[in-house]
Amino acid sequence: MCDHSRPTVPDPDVELEETLRRLTFVRQTSLSTGYERSDKNTAGLSDSQTPGQSPRKGLRSRSFSHDSYKSSMQQQDMNGHISTASAEHHTKMTNGADPRPITSNGVAAAEVNEDEIVDEMASQYKQIITHLGEDPTRQGLLKTPQRAAKAMMFFTKGYKENIAEILNDAIFDEDHDEIVLVKDIEMFSLCEHHLVPFMGKVHIGYLPNNKILGLSKLARIVEVYSRRLQVQERLTKQIAVAITEAVQPAGVGVVVEACHMCMVMRGVQKLNSKTITSTMLGVFRDDPKTREEFLALALAK
Ligand SMILES: [Zn+2]
């Protein structure tokens, strides 16, 4: 039977949680530095905003402190865990390497001949059809195993795609400090528990910090991660992490609204029920006003 002896594939959830902890930590450290600075400079911009001071003013001072900590990082003269965490991040970005879940899977898939995989999967689909009590040699089913195998490869083509490569030429310097929002990005994925589709819409917002992403790339990020075996929660987080790692924004918010065929077709839920997940990083996590502004824009019909 099938034995391609693939390299061990890392658990995407374990790695994702580590990355999220790192990002949340870096962001919060950077934010608290920003608050200290603005306390000294503008007197009293803190968690409770002084009347008349918009949250945006707070964000600018945070961006400033983020910059200064980045340049300190390049000089490698910073002490403590801030530089450790961000230096690690810096290395990852300049390597052009993706976080491990992507590359390791991508490499694993690329090393094995794709035609061989399709042929092997086809023979396994043929067995499945037989197990269902069908005759895989009847005319209508004759080519089904091969078609099903190819379809499955397409539905999971995200394993072969590399976020860093895709985003490489689409990161621009831009002094834009309002929320960038792209909503209703169509998403089709496969539930990893049942290998049945779930589909819906993704809304992405981020607050740039001197760098922006080409708008079409947000949809590409959704595509790369949704074309894998997924759970909606992980998909949501992976999109947020990818944007954070690409342009180090002041904050990111991702909302995914999806309909799961494993629920609908098995009759567990009503036909039109939606599952909504969200991930908030940076100021979208820490500043309620920014989060509310994003959610209002994202979920407005
Ligand atoms: Zn499912």
Image (cartoon, rainbow, N blue to C red):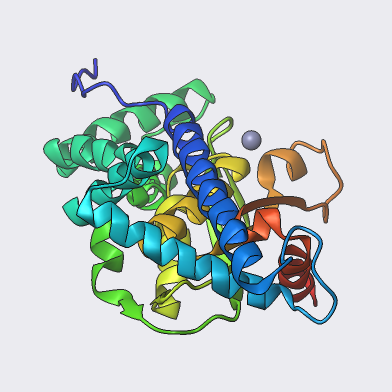
Taking 167 as reference, is 226 left or right?
right
In the rendered view of the protein, which quadrant contains the C terminus?
A: bottom right
Q: Position of residue 49 (x, y in %)?
A: 79, 67
The answer to whether one can see residue 248 in this image is no
Q: Quadrant of residue 9?
A: top left
Q: Quadrant of residue 83?
A: top left
- Residue at image x 66%, y 76%? 56
Q: Position of residue 131 (x, y in %)?
A: 49, 21
In the rendered view of the protein, which quadrant contains the N terminus?
A: top left
Front-most of 259 and 84? 84
Front-most of 204 and 245? 245
Residue 5, compared with residue 74, is above or below; it is above
Q: Position of residue 166 (x, y in %)?
A: 28, 65
Front-most of 54 and 278? 54
Q: Position of residue 39 (x, y in %)?
A: 65, 63
The answer to whether one can see residue 115 in this image is yes
Specify the quarter for ligand 1: top right
Taking 44 as reference, is 143 left or right?
left
Q: Quadrant of residue 61?
A: bottom right
Residue 59, compared with residue 85, is above or below; it is below
Front-most of 134 and 49? 49
Residue 113, compared with residue 62, is above or below; it is above
Count of number-bearing discs: 0
- Residue at image x 46%, y 37%? 16
> Hey, which residue is sitting farthest top in the picture?
1
- Residue at image x 42%, y 77%? 216
